Amino acid sequence: MIHIATVHWRTDRWIDIQLRYLERNLDQPYRIYAWIDEQVRDQASKFFYATDVPVDRHELKLTLLGDLVAHAAADDDDLLPMSIRLFRVILQVSDIEQAARFYAALLGVAGERVSRGRHYFDCGGTILACFDPRADGNAFNASPNPDHVYFAVDDLEAVHARAKACACREVDETISTWPWGERSFYATDPFGNPLCFVDGGTVFRGGRFVE
């Protein structure tokens, strides 16, 4: 964010000229803080901040505006985008032992039991957490996810073969190629959770609209 301090006095002659110049030449977000005279008070809405408090000295107006801008710029740190990453996805299961065996065979990794009802699989830095509520001491039953969890894999054919050999409730017979370019197949685990496995070289991350 660019913060700009400006002083306009006696006339509004230069206000629109200045604003048009800034609009044409700045390609980053900006805010204008203005000290204006009472005679041009009707122009105040054109600025992010404007005041017409009577002050005689031009340099004092700029100094005071500079203090205001310094505080505003310091607050920009609160507006900076945070670093956000998805680190855990929960799949509820009704039998943690069966889930641990199923996903170990499907994913090709043993995973780690972290509690009586939770078994973690590290999928490229994102944890797939199989969670059995009853085994973990909770008073509710497992409910399958309403939509698919998507996995990107290096060898889609090998994972497809493993899925067909595992106890999937459902699994596509063939691998499909979709209009957005992904190669994938869909499956459902023994607990009703829908899954999709995608060829990692064809992952669609947006960037264009797909009809």
Image: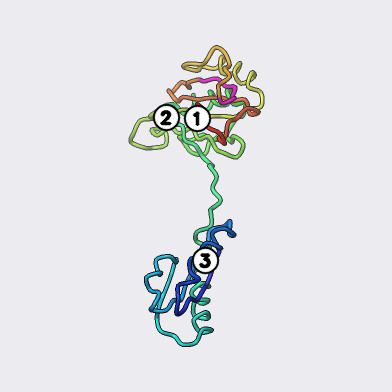
Which is nearer the N-term, disc 3 or disc 2?
3
Badge 1: how crowded within 10 Å, few (<14), some, or many (20+)?
some
- Label 2 element class: loop
Find disc 3 in the rendering and name its residue: 17
Mark 1 to mark 3: distance in Å?
A: 54 Å
Total labels: the figure holds 3
Residue span colored magenta: 180-186
Q: Find residue 46 and report its horizontal and vertical position in percent.
A: 43, 65
Give how far apart the Cα atoms at labels 3 and 2 are: 58 Å
Q: Hey, what amino acid is under mark 2? A: Asn
Residue 1 seen in this snapshot: no
Q: Is residue 164 above or below residue 202?
A: above
Q: Position of residue 206 (x, y in %)?
A: 55, 35
Q: Amino acid at mark 3?
A: Ile
Q: Position of residue 40 (x, y in %)?
A: 40, 74
Tell me which label, 1 or 3, sits earlier in the chain.
3
**Which quadrant is the N terminus positioned in?**
bottom right
Q: Quadrant of residue 141?
A: top left
**Label 2: few (<14), some (14–19) or many (≥20) C-alpha neighbours in 10 Å:** some
List the residue tagged with mark 2: 145
Query: Which dot, 1 or 3, sits closer to the camera?
Result: 3
